[in-house]
Image (cartoon, rainbow, N blue to C red):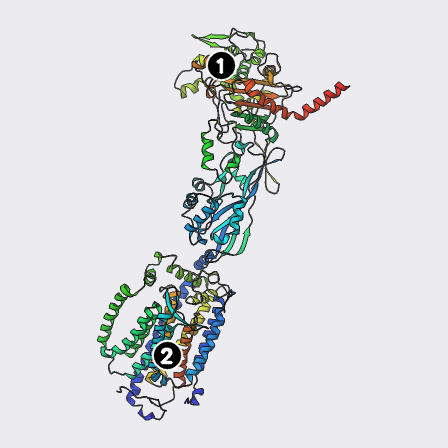
Amino acid sequence: MKWSGYKNLEELSEHDDAALDSLKRRLVAVGVLILCFALLIFSRLWFLQIHKGEEYKNRADNNRVRMSDIVAPRGAIQDRAGREMVTNRPSFNVVLVRADSNDVDKLLKKLATVLDVDISQLWEKIREVEHKPRHIPIRLLEDVNWETLAYVENHNQEFPGIRIETIPARVYHYGDLAAHAIGYLGEISRKELETRDSDLYSGGDLIGKMGLERLREQDLRGEKGTNYTEVNAKGFEQQLLKDVEPLPGNDIQLTLDVDLQKVAEDLMSAGEKAGAVVAMEVKTGRVLVVASNPVLPLEHFVGGISHKNWNALLENPKHPLINKVVQAMYPPGSTYKMITAMAGLATGVIDRDTVLYCPGHYSFGNRRYHCWKRSGHGAVNLKRAISESCDVYFYQVGLRVGVDKLAEFANKFGLGHRSGIELEYEKSGLTPTKEWKKKNRGRKWQEGETLSIAIGQGFNLVTPLQICLMTATIANGGKQFLPQLIEKVTDPDGKVLEQFEPVVVEELKGEKRHLEEIRKGMVEVVQGKRGTARKVRIEGISIGGKTGTAQVVRLAQYKHLKEEDIPYKYRDHAWFTCYAPADDPEIAVTVLVEHGLHGGSGAGPVARAVLVKYFEERLAQAAAEAEQKNEE
Amino acid sequence: MLRVDRRCFHNFDWILLLFLLAVSGMALLNLYSASYPPVSWGMPPYIKQCYLFLMGMMGILFLLSFDYRELQYWNYPFYVLIIILLLVVLFAGKSAGGAQRWINLGFFKLQPSELAKLMLVVTLASYYSRKEVEGGYGLKDMVTPILLTMLPFLLIMKQPDLGTALMLGIIFVSMTVFARLRLQTYGVGMLLGSGATVFAWFYLLKPYQKRRIETLLNPGKDPMGQGYQILQSKIAVGSGGNFGKGYLEGTQGHLHFLPERHTDFAFSVWGEEWGFVGSLFFLGVYFSMLLWGLYVAMTARDRFGVFLSFGVVMLIFWQAVINLLMVLGFLPVVGIPLPLVSYGGSSLLTTLLALGILMNVRMRRFQTGQGMEKTSKG
């Protein structure tokens, strides 16, 4: 078998050579074949690397660079003295990156047991954003506590795809103080996402849902930063490429005074009252107090409010979700009598000395209109009419002036239209006119209705803010200011972006004398012997005010009951509005207590407490001086 | 026993060696990048590949020490040995991904299916060079080579290793067509071939193998599976652009977007880091080497030498083409390495030995003598 040497050269025949040559000739074809394939591959390389090179470069970058938002710290909200009301704190969210998890189902099951949450709740969160790319983080749980945080961090090997995200969350230094004005944040809804600038927002972002948080969203939100991270194919982060720092939101300084606000809210809450307290600077229109009770539990909204808590708010008969300062309307009751008086004086149908007789009722048409004091006030001039709130006096003034004139003056004091305060869903109230009735009710105005209007009942509707604005306008001599809630807006560097100066919306000219007469009556309400709000009196400070009772229903069946026996929801609303000091007014305070029965007793004490707080220093000083005098 | 003619040294194929060293050098450079950053455990692939390369070079030296014609005698013992190894693998091999392909030799895992490719080249070259038929081979002549191919083919299919089995088929077809059949034999062959394909589709292919082919035909169907691998490879190569991202700078490879980046998809790493220019250079050298292989066949002394060189060139060429077309998104992922470039000891050794045979043929192109008995002549 062994092959042996090279000796048989001769055996290589001619024939063999020819066969070998023909075989070798085929190799040329093979070479062409190889070249063809080489050409195919080269052109494919050209196509991928040159022709589509840019496109694939982008795709490679998309592969490896994961951009994620860095949430910007929201602007702070301060009171007028610069005290921080709302700032931020770090909050920890448990987020899921589906791309990093190979078995989401298993992961969630484990997570649900460890964190003691309902798994369906977690799936719900995922379902909401199912259409998004798998590397977009999904917030499963928001604002988790330290124990949860520590557990998840320490066991992160067991939870692939689960990460902890730190974002700023709202912290409310004064609890629920001014909750309605401040408002709350919530996760952006799909609808909001569609209407908002898509560059600024993405799913899962927090957005102001109510109050100033919503109205001033543009200022407060700041600008998101971006984090560019290189990731590998499994989604694990390799290195930080760059960080674009977020731009914090602008700070908002309110005109509110937390001390006064607190006094107002505490008193309302203590009496479990539903209603509103508004206080404003008479000479600027700056709002010092906007309180609506019951308050909103702001903390419940951090990290998303639970269904249970939300339903409780919805079902609460005292309607905590409504900001009663601007969003609720009530008949103004006797607080409207200043309008009637003003209209009477200005049109000249009465003067300060006009005396009208009150026998306890007034007959008009075929009806008898009662005074609240059935026994009657007797002969009444303007001052007494206001201080004792004589209905019969104002029936007559109203009749002489006519409903349209009443409405005209009501409008001049801020009733019947929105004040323009920076609060949402402000109601305009209603100051009826003949035309209004014809248009809206389709019926002719009955003169008898003018009587009801003149004493603040009937179709009349106002918001507590409007009554406060009216009071301030009376107190300052006729200037109707734009009520302002914001003092200034500053950027993170402290630069003032917006500064709010007092704005006069309308000025009642040439009526200073008449207004003074009205104020005298109002002072008598508090300071007079027979005034309806004597209980509000403060030693050392003279106050002008007016009580009011807004009838809720006029039901015969309750007529004979004692007030305390009438069911809560049928009880009258109590108004009290006032200003102080009487000689040089600075502050106007208006209190409405829903179903609070009487202005003087139901609403007065709250207003009084606010005033006491406001004049605290001056009162203390006066007391000290008095003491000194005594010693001398 | 070993008699080496002096002329052998003069006639040594330096050019082929140069090609071999150039390609291997670039391949090792690429392998370093493909396995970068190095893992803390075990021997890094490029070191291992270096050792195997040296081993392969010694294998070449050993091959060169005797005349390639000796292989005509040794081919059957060699054939039997490989078949035994394939059987051993089937019954005692290590499995990877559900397929049994290796025999663990300690320092490296031997894949007999790789050696089987070279074995088939030698076997068929030996058969066709011995049996010369005027006017092309008939059906009767084909029985032996078909059987010789079928046996290892089925054993490899059984592992299962579709890619390598396919390679055996391709080698068989290439060499047979090169040897030239009668016209009607082609017809029958095609009929039988398509019949076998249908049979294979329904009875032989594993579901994952079918899916690979389906994915190629309809890439959108399976974006995260096979299609994903191909897509990532295309992104890698495409993103290389004109001049590439630079050595060790490829993001697709280093961030693990590329699957099998040091084995089947090694060229993607090269394409990403060296770009169009680098790829052209590399493939230029590679295909030049293959063309030189054809030149070696052209200048071979005898029929066996021609068949042997041709077979070796085809063995490397088809693997390279299939691998490249797969990497560039023209073919499904079939698990065929790029010879000399993909990491893998068995493939490297096989390729080096194959090139050794080529060198041997080249070196002894002037030696005359027809020592062996011809089974058929004329």
Q: Where is residue A146 in the image (x, y as percent from the top left)?
A: 54, 45
Disc 1 residue type (three-letter): Lys
The answer to whether residue A515 is visible is yes
Q: Where is residue A352 in the image (x, y as percent from the top left)?
A: 58, 11
From what the image shows, is residue A411 above or below residue A197? above
Counting other residues with Cα less than 10 Å from the Cα at mark 1, is it few (<14), some (14-19), or many (20 or more)?
few
Q: Residue at x 26, y 66 (%)?
A: B199
Q: Where is residue B100 in the image (x, y as percent from the top left)?
A: 37, 68
From what the image shows, is residue B191 above or below residue A524? below
- Of circles 1 and 2, which is in front? 1
Pick out the residue farthest to the right: A632
Q: Do discs 1 and 2 share a chain?
A: no
User: Where residue A562 is drawn, which disc sits there?
Assistant: 1
Pick out the residue farthest to the front: B92
> The residue tagged with tag 2: helix, strand or loop?
helix
Label 2 belongs to which residue? B294
Quadrant showing the N terminus of chain B? bottom left
Disc 2 residue type (three-letter): Leu
Counting other residues with Cα less than 10 Å from the Cα at mark 2, is it few (<14), some (14-19), or many (20 or more)?
many
From what the image shows, is residue A369 above or below residue B263? above
Quarter location, residue A192: top left
- Label 1 marks a residue whose chain is A
Instruction: Give the alpha-carbon distance from disc 1 to disc 2, as whole Å.
Output: 119 Å
Q: Position of residue B283 (x, y in %)?
A: 42, 71
Q: In this view, does B314 lie to the left or right of B35?
A: left
The answer to whether residue A478 is visible is no
Q: Which residue is drawn at 39% across and 57% down?
A: B224
